[in-house]
Amino acid sequence: MEPLNTNFESPFWGRGLRVAGVDEVGRGPLAGPVVAAAVVLNPEAFPEGLRDSKMLSPKRREAMTLLIRQQAEVGIGFASVEEIDKINILQATYLAMRRALAALPRPPDHALIDGNRNPSDLPCPGTPIVRGDSKSPSIAAASIVAKTWRDDVMKKIATQYPGYGWETNAGYPTKCHKDALRNLGVTPHHRRSFRPVHNILYQDNFSSD
């Protein structure tokens, strides 16, 4: 893995510009929103130990999220299950990213976007960075905040719909989740445009005809 450094941020920081790292979480789950975070780090002081959120334990992510919120500007944006089903997961992801940038206390001068292309209609110029969460501390910070926020959401709705394992699988298609889909059925939090959910709905409709 390439080490995190500020190579992407430094050219902007050197000109006194504010840079936002943007990352999303939740493109692959069968249930729940897709969530994006935008984080503007302070070039003079930001948390040590920033890493891609997937490399950190849940406890470490929560601790890092507190530090990031104390030392940086943070914006959160999400797209609902209804929006995902209406406009598709890619466009919903871009919508969440735009909302995250708009939720920052002040608009950034530039955005570093995790991925291979920029969303359309960004409020500022942007640079896409493939695997950016493992290269840019700003994007890594965004990945941590987004993951923590979404996991909390999934834990809350898991109390309303027990049995799907969302408190541990966050809506991803684990065996437990897929078994529950077959045995307990589809909830309002499931993405009906995703094939495993669509197939169960179709089978249910077909069997009731």
Image (cartoon, rainbow, N blue to C red):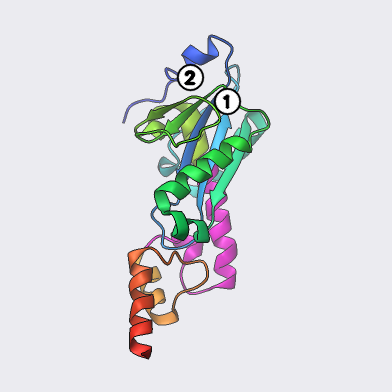
Dot 1: within a 10 Å radius of its alpha carbon, few (fewer than 14), some, or many (20 or more) residues?
many
As for residue 166 lying within the magenta part, the answer is: yes
Q: Position of residue 203 (x, y in %)?
A: 33, 81
Q: Reading the chain from its start, which is encountered first: label 2 or label 1?
A: 2
Comparing 161 with 168, the one in front is 161
Q: How far apart in space, not on screen, are marks 2 and 1 (Cα)?
A: 9 Å
Give the side of residue 72 with respect to residue 147, left or right. Answer: right
The answer to whether any part of residue 186 appears in the image is yes
Q: How many marks?
A: 2
Quadrant location of the C terminus in the rendered image: bottom left
Q: Position of residue 10 (x, y in %)?
A: 48, 14
Label 2 crowd (10 A; few <14 / some 14-19 / many >=20):
many
The disc label shown at residue 41, or none: 1
Magenta region:
144-173
The structure residue drawn at horizontal position 37% and vertical position 63%, both measured from the top left corner, is 194
Tag 2 near tag 1, CB within 8 Å = yes
